[in-house]
Image (cartoon, rainbow, N blue to C red):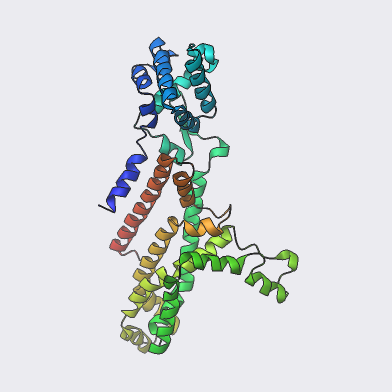
Amino acid sequence: MTFLAPIGFMLWKSVYDPEVAGLLGQTRQALAKWQTSTGLPGPEGFDALSRDLRDLTGDGRVSQLALRLNRERSGMRQLIEVTADAIAEYDRPLLEIDPRWGDPDTWVLLKRMTQPLTARYFLSAVDLQQTPQGSIVRQDESRRIYVYLFGRTILVASVVTAVCIILGYPFAYALATARPRMQRLLFFIVMLPFWTSLLVRTTAWIVLLQRRGVLNEILVAMNIVSERSRLELIYNLSGTLIVMTHVLLPFFVLPLYAVMKGIPKQYVRAGKSLGAGPVRVFLRIYLPMTLPGVLAGAALVFILSLGYYVTPALVGGRTGQLISNQIAFHVQTSLNWGLAAALGSILLVIVVVLTMLLSRVTQRGVL
């Protein structure tokens, strides 16, 4: 339950938004039977909204409604606040307060926002929106960020996984074939990151990689780079890739080591005794037997990379941010939990699909 309940709450939150419906209860009832194709709602719709705004002014919740509607359409905050003040002071008709209440699109937005079950969060999560006429179109170009971030997240996860395979395979082989004393040393190297705080490790990389950091100072001292050509290795995508690879490399090495340790040495010796060279023995015997470990380690690193948050937040800068950072922003700063839940749900679906594909590939013996 502790595992499934938060996931279920996230999925429900991504399609359920009762906030506006709770604030505009009378308006919701009045607009329930209104056909948007008929233009403006009848007088009962205007009167219901006036009563709701008067009640919200008395409760001090007008700003809550204004902020929530402004998140969907720019300018709604000013319209709601001005209208609420005028109703409280003069009790004038809505059309006399602001001519924008004569725009059918404004009422279509109100009707859509007063429906608790909604798909708008998922539409926003893939850079789409619903027009007042009901069609689905792309967001304005300045607001299309989430599809790009999903693509960048998958790209970063793929690159980190590939680098972990390149670095981790020979290290795991050395760990599996080393003598006991050397093996203990290599194990210490693998386990050391787990004994160190992630924040400490990330801060250490900042010291090493920054423009005036250790690495750049060494390169300048050795005349490999000039003073003006110092490498930009931090607060960008490069910093995210370097630090994530360092943090996640042990998660690839350990599963692969477990598989390598279980491979009988007689198989390799048999291949050599039958005349195969070292390269042929490796490609035809050893590598195929280690592929389950490679697959398990790569899947673990890739899935962990998809949801990584701390490292991109500290060293990613503007170009190294991933989708997890946007999820955290909407949870902690913008308080748009519905959009955060939709983004998290899409990320969850990606992980589940990849896991199912991995399981099917393994069952069919493709690797």
Whole-percent x, y for residue 67 in the image: 48, 32
Specify whether residue 240 is in view: yes
- Report whether 301 appears left or right of 76: left
Please, is residue 258 above or below residue 153 in the view?
A: below
Q: State the residue in front, 147 or 203.
A: 203
Q: Is residue 163 visible?
A: no
Q: Position of residue 253 (x, y in %)?
A: 41, 73
User: Which residue sits at x=71%, y=70%?
Assistant: 225
In the rendered view, tell whether residue 225 sits above or below residue 180. above
The one nearer the camera, 154 or 308, is 308
Q: Residue at x 33, y 17 (%)?
A: 33
Front residue of 214/300: it is: 214
Q: Quadrant of the C terminus?
A: bottom left
Q: Position of residue 184 (x, y in %)?
A: 40, 84
Find residue 64 and report its image quarter. Answer: top left
Image point 44% across, 40% down: which residue? 336
Q: Where residue 213 appears, x then y in whole percent?
A: 64, 68
